[in-house]
Amino acid sequence: MRFPLQADPHAAYSYVIPSVSPASDHVAFTVKGPAPYAPWTSWMVYTGKAQPFSVVGKSEIAPDAGNVNPWSGAPTAISAPSRDFTLLVLPKGVDQSTTAKSLQAIPPSNVLRSPSDTSGGPMWLLANRVYAAFPGYNRGGSGGPADSPFPVVRAVDYTTGESIPCGPLNQLPEVVQTPPTSPPATHTPLARNNLVLKNGLPFDRLLSSDSSAQGFQFAPPNPKGLIVFTRPPLLPGADVSAIPPKDNCAGYLGTPTPTGQISLIRMPHVATYFDTKRVTPETPYVQNEADFISFTQYGSAVGVYRPGTLFTTSLGDAELNVDASGGSTILVWPRSLGAADRQKVVAYAKEHGFAIMRGGAANELTTANLLIRMKGASPTYKGAYAPDANRTGVPCYFGTVQQPAHAGKPWSAVTGTKFAASPANLGAGAPQGVSGSSSELLDGSLLSALKAHIRSTGGSYSAG
């Protein structure tokens, strides 16, 4: 799926898409199984227009009797084997106390709500996200050394608690029905814009990215020579920690990257994250500044996740090459860069310890967009993007900001410390960047320009 709906390759996204049922059908859903072997997960309900409707985060999930929530901290090990849970998805307006006794026993913290009418579309989505699964497990945090199954979703009659057939409710086309977390059998991208749901609606309409909407996925243009990150408004399919979000924003930062120039981006302090490579059978979950952080490039061309190579279009956690000061510099090279220049640019980046990734492509539908995701941010971490009682966060830009310029607000209407991620609102966690030619990189002037730009905004190249 095109930006902003593309998955992070460090994660697994699994979906159930049922039709909205009339109240007289008494349809609810249960989710039962083990918690994933990962530092972060969530379950979320979206409307048929892919707008957030209900959410349950990892720490809110009450375990089944005799089991543990692996994210509860010491003395519970995050890889504890007894980790089963049960969720209930009830139509909006149904009182849980009127349901079957077996469903009443499910803790209220484990209850999600689904649309009870078709105002948001004839179907809805139940989405599970799992990030940074432990080594040896699949991206959904299942399988692995524990041979852990993926949770099972069942349709039930909420007045009796008995199972009912799922088939008539399922809106996913047969072509995309594969076991959760299983990779595609082919590397050929699936043309989802050509898929039709069982109710006859095109898949793109469900995701609100109609291909006829020119510039639908353009990010606000950057000032010349700068890479400025902003926080987009709540977009279809966006992940949020609460319903509704406090400021109606998506939970990540984004910026367009130039397709003909090198982008050099610095995050003086990378949030400390849960290191899955150091997990032992006794390791408890510890709330770090974040559970996971990544940079991922999108656009009109296909990107690949090939960690450790210059062709990867995503970097997460240790792949960011965090330096001794706790920061990271990321070099994004354009696809238009010739082989000879590319060799020199890569050698320069490696010499300086920069993380390297390939840039994206642009067309009439999308810019080459770079997203930063931060999952499971601590409520006290001032570098996190969403505002709370401890931090200002980054306000999102509102209104139309599509390109060409005449289609919406000019950049001057949304730039500056009010809307851009800067040291003023994120401290040393603010990502900032510059762009230029390969010759400017190789003679050191681009790095000097980056340091000067960070100083001009009140920050420092190295936080340590």
Image: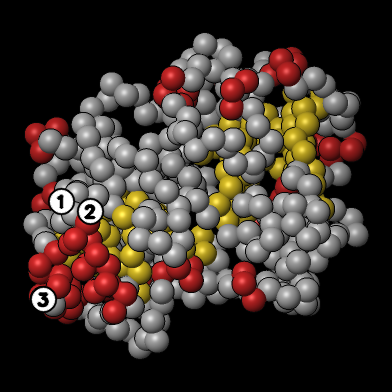
Q: Which residue is mark 2?
A: 334
In the image, what residue occupies the spot 41% across and 74% down? 321
- SS label for mark 1: loop
Looking at numbered disc 2 in the image, what kind of residue is underneath it?
A: Pro
Residue 195 position in % (x across, y down) = 49, 20
Q: Quadrant of the C terminus?
A: bottom left
Q: Of marks 3 and 1, which one's residue comes earlier in the chain?
A: 1
User: Label 1: few (<14), some or many (≥20) within 10 Å?
Assistant: some
Is residue 404 in view? Answer: yes
Q: Is residue 114 left or right of residue 271?
A: right
User: Label 3: few (<14), some or many (≥20) within 10 Å?
Assistant: few
Check if mark 2's residue and mark 1's residue have beta carbons within 8 Å.
Answer: yes
Using the rendered view, name the quadrant where residue 92 is placed: top right
Q: Is residue 157 left or right of residue 121?
A: right
In the image, what residue occupies the spot 13% across and 77% down? 444
Q: Is residue 329 above or below residue 371?
A: below
Q: Which residue is mark 3?
A: 443
Q: Of marks 3 and 2, which one's residue comes earlier in the chain?
A: 2
User: Label 2: few (<14), some or many (≥20) within 10 Å?
Assistant: many
Q: Which residue is mark 1?
A: 260
Using the rendered view, name the quadrant where residue 191 is placed: top left
- SS label for mark 2: loop
Looking at numbered disc 1 in the image, what kind of residue is underneath it?
A: Gly
In the image, what residue occupies the spot 59% across and 22% down? 175
Residue 418 position in % (x across, y down) = 22, 60
Q: Is residue 326 left or right of residue 300?
A: right
Looking at numbered disc 3 in the image, what kind of residue is underneath it?
A: Asp
